[in-house]
Amino acid sequence: MKTVLTSLVIAASFSAHAGIEDSVKALASVGREGAGNEAAGVAWREVVKAGTSALPALLKAAGKGSPVADNWIRTAGDAIIAAELAAKRKPDLAPVISFLKDTSNAGGARVLAFDLIRQADSSAADGIEPTLISDPVQALRRGAVERLIQAAKKADGDAAKAIYTKALAAVRDEDQTKTIAGALDKFGVKVDLPQHFGFVMKWHVIGPFDNTERKGFDTVFPPEKEINLDAKYDGKSGSVKWQSVVSDDAYGKIDINKPLGAKKEVTAYAVSTFEAPEARDAEIRLGCKNAWKVWVNGELLFGRDEYHRGQKMDQYIMKCWLKKGTNTILVKACQNEQTEQWTVEWEFQLRVCDSTGTAILAANR
Amino acid sequence: MNTRLFLSIIATASLPLEAADWPQFRGPDSSGTVAGAQIPAKPKIDWTAPLPGRGLASPIVVGDRVFVTCSSGPSQERLHVICFSANDGSRIWERQLQATGRTMAHPKTSVAACTPCSDGRSVFAIWSTNDMAAFDLDGGLLWVRGLTADYPNASNSLGMASSPIVIGGTVVTMIENDSESYTLGIDAKTGRNLWKLDRPKSANWTSPVPWKTDASSPAVAVLQSSKGLLGVNAETGSTLWEYKDGASTMSSSVVSGGVIYAPSNGITAIVPKANGEEPEQLWRSRQINPSTISPVVLGGMIFSINGAGVIATADIKTGDNKWKLRLTGSFSGSPVGSGNHLVAVNENGLLQIVDTAVEGGAVKGTVQLPLKKEPEELVLSTPALSGGKIFVRADSALWRIGNDGE
């Protein structure tokens, strides 16, 4: 009888586990335009009902490439921890902490693990956070970097300088980098911001081509067909040729108005060669308040026809593949017809980095 | 089960919203008013509920619950939905999502700029990132969408701000911008598209409003843009009529008594026609310029506040100008009201009650909301009304305002 009961318990447990696995799979399987929402809605309740036993399966399913699926998973984890706290139970965080510490797990899933730890037990999260200073996931580093910044602000002299120097090695976010670089500057340490971020500083620019009625955005001008730095082409108001431009901006801005003059209803191109030491995945991160397109090695990564709504570093993040050796990065930047003072800018900033924001530097930098 | 009980359940299930609810931006019918609300003559803060992040999305009220959205994190990538008790401000539940769309926005606005909406059963929240989620009233997730994940060029680097509405079983949400610009009719139950309508490629922060031919007719979704107004069948997305004389991309229309008062060339009062012809224009007044703030109709008057805080008024039948009254401060949130009283909260958190029955108008009561100085916060949101209470939020807190002595 005992054996039968044990078998039944094991079978029920296995069945429940399999049920949770299936439910989590439904959450992770949602597709475009809400495909799979109906099944996911049912599965979400099953997963939440299962409680903390579902957390390992949820974490395992997270961070696999669908940020929308991750929100199904995240809210389920959120609801499970909230229910535990409402019931005044202390959730067993050991599996979640173990998952977080394993850096082979997906970055997004590890961020979720840390958030769940924070939600369940903020003192446990406070204890873990400083250990994440060199974590491969930038979002996990940020808290540790902030702790160093706060510690440095309370320290004096060489001690403060040493803490800021340690923080600089870990920092990737723009705001924290500015704070650290500004503090180190007062200690006589100049931080090479373009190098820290991986901004591409050397370009060749050509234009203006026509962009009357904003039609230039979709018009294929010669630089989209060939890159020949010695060539001349018919531009909007005469012959145009490539000009060398080097950014002197700490954040790599290329002001197209400087080589081409402040013009309206025009299109320009900028090209740079990037000597990659090895073949690898990379990210192109662009800031631009003009309509733009970006190609790497002739492949269009993305384009956007929005004008003068604002610009910031890392405004657009695009995945790409760098081949070993010479890579060609081509940017198209369009200026529209608006004449207000705030529509004068015709510029962009572009950097190459990995998915954590760590600079990838070209050999020909 | 007896027939009476069965019918009672059916009636309850099909009409979940209560009369005192404020289920979306600018309340029931998006009109800035709700029948039966009593505006406190001597406003005072009943309770304060701290918020975990920024936002100018208005609170909404469903039954005895208040729902608020926020955004937090270094780039406002954390998206919060929080349910509070309307009675005491205690937090009932909170859910967090991670932004899947772009978080960039003008520093003055925030990612939590779009007011959620409810059909009385569910809450539909959307942020500037175009992340959208539906919850039941107890925080159970019903569905999630990432509308920038679905349509990658749908975003506005200044921030999106249009607030969705629910008509029947359709959530109507305008994702209108300079690039991939569209409006969606989304199945409230499943989150799947019922229809998708291409819209003018132009930044647009206005919100859809429901319009009815008469009380018994199904509501039409009115979509506003720089081109004008479009009446759309909420169930199918088909166009029913169009007004083509341009309209604001910031201040939304208000509907009262079957008339649409559109922020178009000042204010233009129009009545759509059932045969699809261009709507009939009743009047137009360029003396009332709503700027970025949406107008409200109370009694026989339309009220509009400009950014500098001047209330302009006009007769809704003729458009003839009436009085003007300068309030204290500058405004971003729109006024709301009930009966003869307007409620307006300036950016510095001074809530002002205006008696509109007095010729020339008069400020009858005020209360100063205790805004944070570091970092400095502003009230950019539109208040919500329910019963005798006013609900208003800034970045740091949600407040309930009641009547002193009650």
Image (tube, coloured by chain):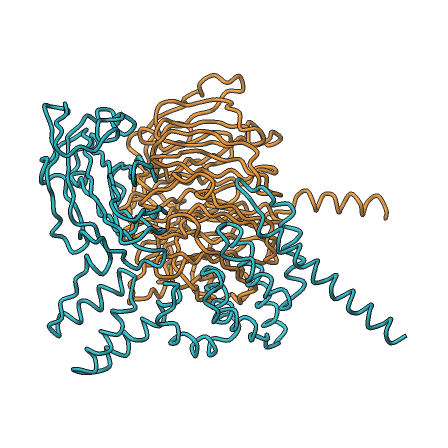
Residue at the image point whose x is 46% and y is 79% from the top: A123
* Colour chain B is painted in: orange
Q: Chain letter for cyan, please.
A: A
Horizontally, residue B211 falls left or right of residue B318, namely right
Residue at the image point whose x is 54% and y is 48% from the top: B144
Horizontally, residue A173 falls left or right of residue A7, namely left
Residue at the image point whose x is 22% and y is 31% from the top: A223
In this view, the residue farthest toward the right is A1
Counting from the top left corner in percent of width and height, residue B259 is at 47, 29
Along the line of sight, the residue nearer the viewer: B276 or A138: A138
How many numbered discs sit on the rendered protein?
A: 0
Determine whether A274 is above or below A240 in the image.
Answer: below
Determine whether A162 is above or below B374 in the image.
Answer: below
Q: Is residue B271 visible?
A: yes
Counting from the top left corner in percent of width and height, residue B238 is at 53, 25
Determine whether A58 is above or below B305 in the image.
Answer: below
In which quadrant of the rendered image does the N terminus of chain A lie?
A: bottom right
Q: Is residue B339 visible?
A: no
Counting from the top left corner in percent of width and height, residue A288 is at 25, 43
Along the line of sight, the residue nearer the viewer: A209 or B226: A209
User: Which image quarter: residue A8?
Assistant: bottom right
Counting from the top left corner in percent of width and height, residue A89 is at 62, 76
